[in-house]
Image: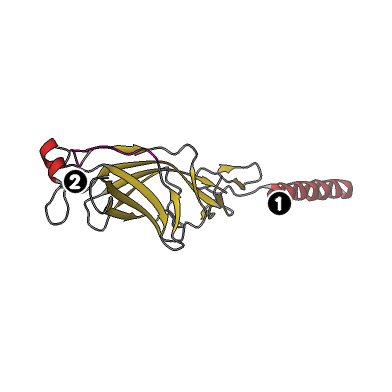
Amino acid sequence: MRNLIITLSLLLFITTSCSSDDSDDACTPIECLNGGIETVDCGCDCSEGYAGSDCSSQIDPSAILINKITITSFPLLKPNGDYWDNSLLDLLSDDKYPDIYVQLINGTTLETLYFPVINYINVEDSLSELEFTPSEPISIQDYDDNIVLAIFDYDEDEDPVTELMDSIELDLYFNTNNFPVESIFVSESFLSNVILELSYEF
């Protein structure tokens, strides 16, 4: 009888020990956010640009890359109602519409970030899609600065040769925007829109 009691006690101890070890080895799965993948030890393998135990924290990029600029609207007339190219020759030849080019500027440092050669001649439709694709992505490291896209009319027969049609401030980043690959910006005048195709470096 005594041997039976000892044997049962040993079995109970072994069973209890095994149950305790299994409990210690188990982990509680967590939800991995922002495309993170759960690991075997109940952690998260975060997507690029995210960190934290559940990948909920957005990492600030080292640079934002502008891959393409598309103007989707612009002011067809000057604020006073005149055509942009309003010399007598322009009006007689129906070349009165703007010859458009753009310039990307760091308004804080006054540095020109992009100044393409291409321009669009005598654009009659204010809702035309005007595309500017740089040969290499435009790298913006100081994206907290005042980044501005300026839209100009060019006319060599007038003085001044260039006129500012509109400008659009580009708030390229905030720490909860989840890294959009396409962003739309509107000028203060609400007359000009631009779409930027973006990517990010970390």
Residue 119 colored in magenta in the image:
yes
Q: Nearer the viewer, residue 121 or 137?
A: 121
On screen, residue 200 versus residue 118, left or right, reads: right
The residue where tag 1 is placed is 24
Structural distance between the alpha carbons of marks 2 and 1:
79 Å
The residue where tag 2 is placed is 85
Q: Magenta stretch mostly in which secondary structure?
A: loop
Q: Residues within 10 Å of mark 1 (few under 14, many from 20)?
A: few
Above or below 97: residue 176: below
On screen, residue 154 versus residue 60, left or right, reads: left
Q: Residues within 10 Å of mark 2 (few under 14, many from 20)?
A: many
The kind of residue tagged 2 is Asp
On screen, residue 181 versus residue 37, left or right, reads: left
Region rendered in magenta: 117-126
Q: Measuring 29% from the left and 37% from the top, which residue is drawn there?
A: 120
Coloration mode: secondary structure
Q: Nearer the viewer, residue 157 or 80?
A: 157
> SS of the residue at dot 1?
helix
Q: Measuring 20% from the left and 49% from the top, which residue is drawn there?
A: 75
> SS of the residue at dot 2?
loop
Q: Nearer the viewer, residue 150 or 172?
A: 150
- The picture places residue 86, in percent across and down from the top left corner, at 15, 47
Residue 127 colored in magenta in the image:
no
- The picture places residue 50, in percent across and down from the top left corner, at 54, 50
The kind of residue tagged 1 is Asp
